[in-house]
Image (cartoon, rainbow, N blue to C red):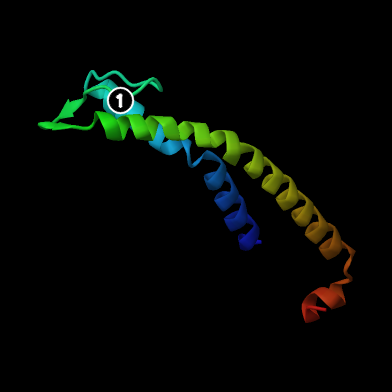
């Protein structure tokens, strides 16, 4: 059963992965009073270095979610079907078959 939960965690991580850099970029930009949007890179000086280009690139990664969310939803449907199949098959086995692994 732990394989199912590991697979579920990986599917969910894959689906939301593009939004992690967006949240980080937004938090860093907001904390330093920098402008961040899809229109382009704006200067954002933090500790004497301009991170505007990096923050802009991280902010645009959210658009990859247009691809990963639907793929993740399809994978989640497959995951549910496989889990359901496994549970129904396991329930249909007699107690003697469960102990021998047949």
| Side of 22 relative to 88 (left or right) | left
Where disc 1 sits, the SS reads loop
51 horizontally vs 88: left or right: left
Q: Is residue 86 left or right of residue 74?
A: right
Residue farthest along the left direction in this orientation: 48
Res. 23 visible in picture: no
Q: Position of residue 65 (x, y in %)?
A: 54, 35
Q: Position of residue 34 (x, y in %)?
A: 25, 20
- Tell me, yes or no, if residue 70 can be seen here: yes
Q: Residue at x 21, y 23 (%)?
A: 43
From what the image shows, is residue 73 above or below residue 53?
Answer: below
Q: Residues within 10 Å of mark 1 (few under 14, many from 20)?
A: some
Q: Which residue is situated farthest in the front direction here? A: 40
- Side of 15 relative to 54 (left or right): right
Q: Is residue 13 above or below residue 48?
A: below
Q: Based on the displayed image, in which of its 4 quarters is residue 73 positioned?
A: top right
Quarter that holds the C terminus: bottom right
Q: Which residue is mark 1?
A: 41
Q: Position of residue 47 (x, y in %)?
A: 11, 32
Name the residue located 58 percent from the left edge and 33 percent from the top edge.
Answer: 66
Given residues 58 and 99, the one toward you in this image is: 58
Query: Where, by quadrant of the figure, is residue 45 drawn?
Result: top left
Tell me the residue at 22%/32% (across/down): 51
Residue drawn where x is 25% and y is 28% of the image:
52
> Where is 61 relative to 45, above or below?
below
Residue 53 at x, y percent in the picture: 28, 32
In the displayed structure, would residue 34 be above or below residue 93? above
């Amino acid at each position: 059963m732990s394989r199912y939960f590991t697979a579920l965690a990986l599917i969910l991580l894959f689906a939301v992965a593009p939004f992690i850099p967006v949240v980080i970029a937004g938090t860093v930009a907001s904390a330093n009073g920098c402008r961040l949007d899809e229109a382009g890179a704006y200067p954002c000086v933090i500790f004497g270095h301009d991170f505007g280009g990096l923050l802009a690139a991280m902010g645009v990664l959210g658009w990859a979610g247009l691809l990963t969310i639907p793929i993740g939803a399809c994978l989640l449907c497959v995951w549910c079907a496989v889990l359901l199949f496994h549970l129904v098959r396991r329930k249909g086995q007699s107690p003697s078959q469960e102990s021998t692994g047949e």
